[in-house]
Structure formats: structure tokens, C-alpha cells
Amino acid sequence: MPKCVYCGRVYEFPRGLTLVTKEGNVKYLCSSKCRKNMAMKRRRVRWITKKEKAKK
């Protein structure tokens, strides 16, 4: 099962988006929310830091 490169969530394979860069790197994204935030080059958004705190 792939893991989202933006938020770190593990999700089922038929969902999400798979990006392949020109260099051949494969990036998995779980939702359009993660895709849009990654495109805007945001890294510290509130909903990701809440997930990280809940894990600890």
C-alpha cells in the first residue's frame, strides 16, 4: 500500500494519485488536498501538524 509523500497517510491503492517526475521518481498522493498543497509548496499546514501530534 502506498504512503502519501505529503501527509504520510497510508491508503488503498486504487485511490489517490501517482506522479512520475522527469527523473523517474514516483510520488504517491492520497488526495487532491495533498496535491494542491504540494503544488503551492506548503509544508507546515495545520491539519498535518495535528496528525503528527496525535501519533506521539
Image (cartoon, rainbow, N blue to C red):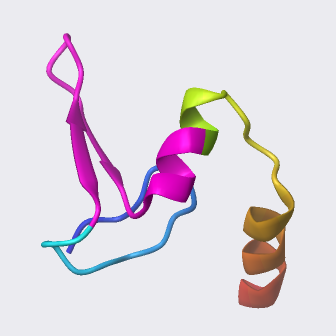
Question: In this rendering, would 20 be left or right of 7?
Answer: left
Can residue 26 be found in the magenta stretch?
yes
In the image, 8 versus 40, the foreground residue is: 40
Q: Residue at x 55, y 29 (%)?
A: 39
User: Percent position (x, y) of residue 15?
Assistant: 23, 71
Can residue 21 be found in the magenta stretch?
yes
Q: Which residues are magenta?
A: 16-36
Question: In this rendering, would 55 be left or right of 13?
Answer: right
User: Percent position (x, y) of residue 11?
Assistant: 32, 78
Question: In this rendering, would 32 be left or right of 44?
Answer: left
Q: Is residue 6 above or below residue 2?
A: above
**Location of the C terminus (image quadrant):** bottom right
Picture mark count: 0
Question: In this rendering, would 2 be left or right of 49?
Answer: left
In the image, 47 versus 3, the foreground residue is: 47
Q: Is residue 1 above or below residue 22?
A: below
Q: Residue at x 23, y 80 (%)?
A: 12
